[in-house]
């Protein structure tokens, strides 16, 4: 019986030492490098939320998923960015939220952009037309082609 009690004490002591050492190691990593210890993202099903304070976000939601993609292994990585093909009729600090390239049955095409609180369209030649104004500048508008027409949801 006494042997069993000593064994229990040894296991408990081992667990306490392991937890303490792990906590101290994480603190040292943060102090020496200025970086937080690595973390694992297991769920992004909540998507992008730019309206809620960062400290209040539930698990599975991120305040910054712009310009990110999930690769073949489901690892979250930053995209390398985009190149400017046209000059949008908005200020340079306007948030670019989404774009869509529409190709119609007759062969014509349009490029549609959600930037800031507006949606703009061009057929080329850097001439833009505002088609929707006053929408959310926090949630990207989604585009889809259905029956030869572009549909938007935001």
Image (cartoon, rainbow, N blue to C red):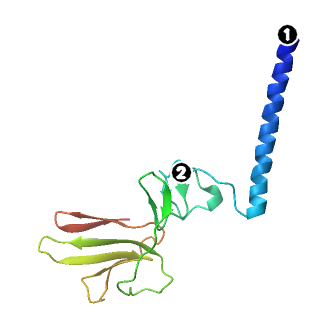
Q: Are marks 1 and 2 in contact (CB under 8 Å)?
A: no
Q: Quadrant of residue 52?
A: bottom right
Quickly name the residue at label 2. 60
Residue 51 point in image, percent of width and height: 55, 64
**Nearer-N-terminus badge (1/2):** 1
Q: Is residue 125 above or below residue 143?
A: below
Q: Quadrant of the C terminus?
A: bottom left
The residue lying at 79 percent from left, 26 percent from top is 11
Q: Is residue 39 left or right of residue 13?
A: left
Q: Is residue 38 above or below residue 109?
A: above
The residue most toward the top is 1
Q: Choose mark 1 or mark 2, whichever is in front.
A: 1
The residue most toward the left is 106
Label 1 neighbour load within 10 Å: few <14, some 14-19, many 20+? few
Query: Closest to the observer: 43 or 23?
Result: 23
Q: Secondary structure at mark 1?
A: loop
| Marking on residue 1 | 1
The residue lying at 73 percent from left, 63 percent from top is 33
Q: Secondary structure at mark 2?
A: loop
Q: Is residue 51 above or below residue 46?
A: below
Label 1 to label 2: alpha-carbon separation: 48 Å
Residue 89 point in image, percent of width and height: 39, 87
Query: Closest to the observer: 58 or 43?
Result: 43
Q: Is residue 78 left or right of residue 111?
A: right
The residue lying at 28 percent from left, 77 percent from top is 111
Q: Quadrant of the N terminus?
A: top right
């Amino acid at each position: 019986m006494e042997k069993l009690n000593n064994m229990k004490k040894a296991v408990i002591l081992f667990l306490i030492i392991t937890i303490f050492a792990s906590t101290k190691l994480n603190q040292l990593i943060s102090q020496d490098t200025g970086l937080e210890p690595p973390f694992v993202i297991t769920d992004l099903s909540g998507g992008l939320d730019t309206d809620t304070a960062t400290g209040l976000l539930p698990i599975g939601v991120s305040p910054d998923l712009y310009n990110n993609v999930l690769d073949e292994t489901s690892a979250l990585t930053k995209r390398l960015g985009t190149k400017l093909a046209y000059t949008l009729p908005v200020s340079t600090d306007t948030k670019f939220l989404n774009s869509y390239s529409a190709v119609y049955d007759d062969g014509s095409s349009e490029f549609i952009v959600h930037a800031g609180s507006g949606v703009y369209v061009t057929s080329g030649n850097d001439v833009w037309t505002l088609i929707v104004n006053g929408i959310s500048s926090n949630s990207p508008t989604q585009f889809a082609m259905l029956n030869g027409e572009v549909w938007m949801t935001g």
